[in-house]
């Protein structure tokens, strides 16, 4: 199957029923937190930004945390950081696995929570911890981030999209409390490229897409945007990388010994290899979304209209 390198889109549809409940829970708990930390995948900041989530959050103070920044193109990530900052939304590249950016995230969260905490002290005569809610799409690293902040595995983690469970308040060593919420995803992907990129990075269930055209679309995209990554990883020649995607796939199969009896290429094995090695970071730093092309419309950050009512109750 030949994929057009200039326009390859794989349909993806996924919206587990329990995510409707999660959306309601986020609305319910938004009033009792000071700051919302929206965790995005640094490789796909646009595609991993839930439009429903933005609608729910509204003007609540928030921070954009760009997780897996170690797997993303650093120059592109910097452009995203500048884009969000122009919207008066702090954006922090981080890596939950290495701990990069974690301290900066904590400091920024406490700073944004200061106004509500000071108001609480004036009204109640006692201090309280800053309260934050970490939200994001499935499999973006929310549970791992909470574990990193808390210092031990308090939140359940599974490497399967959509499985973070049991919302809970967690207190970390600094004066900060976190409310864990399961990841949510929009009911449908209106832009098919969004679903495809989410599938590239493993943020949707494998049942939601056909892995064969997905792998071919990924390969075509890499040939167009990051050919040197493929050349280095699979020892391809410049002539080989300029071929059509099925021919590049065959060349990778031969280089890696993905062969059937008689020397035929085991294409299924090569396709699985491509996606697995990319998702594990073996291809190098890659970004699929550019702010110049994919910049989302963001709500203005304003005052929290519901904060006074809830502060009086807490």
Image (cartoon, rainbow, N blue to C red):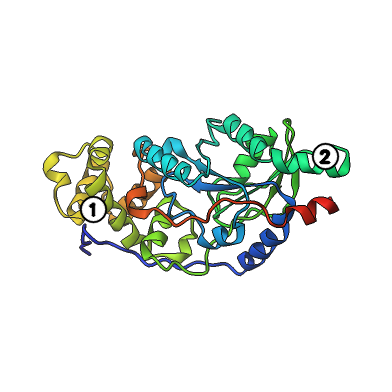
- Characterize the local packing of mark 1: few (<14), some (14-19) or many (20 or more) Cα atoms within 10 angstroms: some
Q: Name the residue under label 1.
A: 265
x and y, in percent, of residue 133 in the image: 66, 48
Question: Image point 14% across, 45% down: which residue?
Answer: 240
Q: In this view, does 193 lie above or below 80?
A: below
- Characterize the local packing of mark 2: few (<14), some (14-19) or many (20 or more) Cα atoms within 10 angstroms: few
x and y, in percent, of residue 148 in the image: 63, 35
Quadrant in which the N terminus appears: bottom left
Query: In the picture, residue 217 is in which quadrant?
Result: bottom left
Query: In the picture, residue 5 is in which quadrant?
Result: bottom left
Q: Nearer the viewer, residue 237 or 149?
A: 149
Whether residue 253 appears in this view of the structure is no
Label 1 sits on a secondary structure element that is: loop
In terms of sequence position, does the residue under pointer 2 or pointer 1 come before the other?
Answer: 2
Label 2 sits on a secondary structure element that is: helix
How far apart are labels 2 and 1 at the CA level? 69 Å
Question: Image point 68% across, 49% down: which residue?
Answer: 180
């Amino acid at each position: 199957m030949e994929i057009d390198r200039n326009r390859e889109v794989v349909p993806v549809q996924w919206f587990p029923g329990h995510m409707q409940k999660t959306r309601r829970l986020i609305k319910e708990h938004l009033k009792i937190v000071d700051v919302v930390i929206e965790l995005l995948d640094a490789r796909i900041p646009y595609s991993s930004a839930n439009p429903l989530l933005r609608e729910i959050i509204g003007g609540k103070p928030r921070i954009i945390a760009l997780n897996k920044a170690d797997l993303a193109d650093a120059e592109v990530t910097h452009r995203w950081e500048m884009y969000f900052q122009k919207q008066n939304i702090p954006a922090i590249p981080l890596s939950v696995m290495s701990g990069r950016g974690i301290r900066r995230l904590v400091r920024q969260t406490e700073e944004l929570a200061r106004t509500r905490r000071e108001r609480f002290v004036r009204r109640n005569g006692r201090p309280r911890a800053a309260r934050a809610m970490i939200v994001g799409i499935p499999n973006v690293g929310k549970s791992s981030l909470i574990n990193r902040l808390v210092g031990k595995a308090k939140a359940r983690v599974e490497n399967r999209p959509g499985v973070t469970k049991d919302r809970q308040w967690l207190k970390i060593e600094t004066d900060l409390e976190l409310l864990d919420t399961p990841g949510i995803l929009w009911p449908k992907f209106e832009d098919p490229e969004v679903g495809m990129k989410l599938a590239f990075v493993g943020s949707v269930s494998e049942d939601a897409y056909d892995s064969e055209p997905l792998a071919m679309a990924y390969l075509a995209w890499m040939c167009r945007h990051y050919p040197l990554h493929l050349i280095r990883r699979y020892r391809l020649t410049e002539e080989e990388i300029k071929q059509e995607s099925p021919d590049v796939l065959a060349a990778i199969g031969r280089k890696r010994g993905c062969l059937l009896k008689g020397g035929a290429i085991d294409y299924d094995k090569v396709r699985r290899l491509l996606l697995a090695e990319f998702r594990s970071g073996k291809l190098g730093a890659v970004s699929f979304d550019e702010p110049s092309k994919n910049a989302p419309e963001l709500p203005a950050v304003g005052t929290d209209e519901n904060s006074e009512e809830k502060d009086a109750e807490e």
